[in-house]
Amino acid sequence: MQNIAATWQASRPSFLVLAPLCVLLGIVVALVQGATPAGQDIALVMLGGLLGHAAVNWLNEYDDYRSGLDFTTARTPFSGGSGTLPAMPSAAAWVLTAGALSLLGVVLIGAYFIWLRGAVLLYPGVVGIALVVAYTRWLTRSPTLCLLAPGLGFGPVMVAGTVLALGGHLDATAASVALVTWLLTSELLLVNQLPDVEADEGHGRRHLPILLGRKGASRWVMAMLLASYAVVALGLLLGWLPWPAALALLPLPLAVWLGRGISADCNAPARLPFWMGINVVTLLSTLALLNLGIALGLA
């Protein structure tokens, strides 16, 4: 039972709420486009999103434990891993197995939707699987790929993939929603890298805070935050998004405060967890309000 509990903890369950929000964006966009997906298909895309996110978390926990990185990070509630495997090494095989089985579940669900909708789903499917497998071991060695990969997985792969899986199509609405998700998710992971610069560098990682320093990386944080809301505003002006989606602009003042706070405190380790928490609130509230706004556009 202890290994089961440890495996669950290593999935970082409090963070798994992001996947349902991203899948839900794909669902509401497909509905706006006139798709009429079956209930079981909606349930399957939601399950696939959750399994994909959990697989990334489990494999990341396992790889960071095996590399020794988990023993050197200054752990916060938002970064540095869950700390599960250093505390219970016997659960390592369980975590690896859970990650592999979750990935297998994603492949099987993807195969069903490829059979249902056609080969167009191969593109997001292959990219998604590659991101899950390659992120920790290889993509974190490249500043550009490390920055882009998280948002690519949750935006174009998860959001746009859901639209296609449910019988929708790629249009300006789907693209703008996927891009907002891409920017916000990559920005979230960028902020979460700030406390771990020294530990990550010592284990071969190479991301923006290592390349540019914390101050240089903090400028990218503000730029990506503002760009995400600019995409929403542009989508509203050009008619890509229904007007109720303007609700997603409500967290903009919070995002500006966050960007300025990260810039001011990026070299103050004791202050970073506060801003990391604000960052999570900003991301989740923006995506939730975007979901609500697009759904209201159905009325």
Image (cartoon, helix red, strand yellow):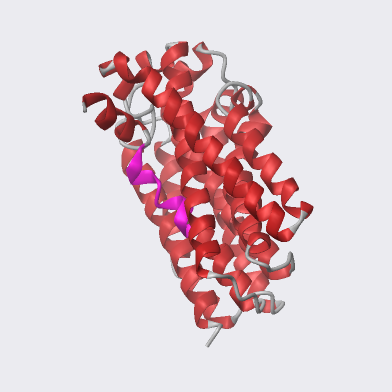
Q: Residue at x 35, y 14 (%)?
A: 71
Left or right, 221 with respect to 15, comes to right
Please state the total of marks drawn on the protein image.
0
Q: State the image coordinates of residue 136 (x, y, percent, origin top left).
A: 55, 25
Q: x, y percentage for residue 15? A: 38, 45
Task: Quarter of the image for the N terminus: give it.
Answer: top left
Residue lying furthest right: 119
Q: Which residues are magenta?
A: 12-22
Name the residue rendered at 26%, 18% in the picture. 87
Q: Nearer the viewer, residue 93 or 197?
A: 93
As drawn, 9 above or below 45: above
Q: Is residue 268 above or below residue 155?
A: above
Magenta residues, dominant SS class: helix
Res 61 quadrant in image: top left
Viewer-nearest residue: 259 or 25: 25
Kindly give the residue lying farthest to the left in the view shown. Answer: 1
Measured as percent of width and height from the top left, residue 150 is found at 57, 41
Residue 297 among those drawn in magenta: no
- Residue in the picture at 30% in, 34% down: 9
Can the viewer see residue 237 in this picture?
A: yes
The answer to whether residue 239 is left or right of residue 243 is right
The residue lying at 59 percent from left, 29 percent from top is 133
Depth order, front residue of 3/81:
3
Residue 263 seen from this side = no
Does 16 appear in magenta?
Answer: yes
Residue furthest to the bottom in view is: 299
Which residue occupies the foreground of this view, 163 or 267?
Answer: 163
Instruction: Decide if residue 25 is on the left or right side of residue 288.
Output: right
Give percent across and percent down for residue 248.
Answer: 50, 69
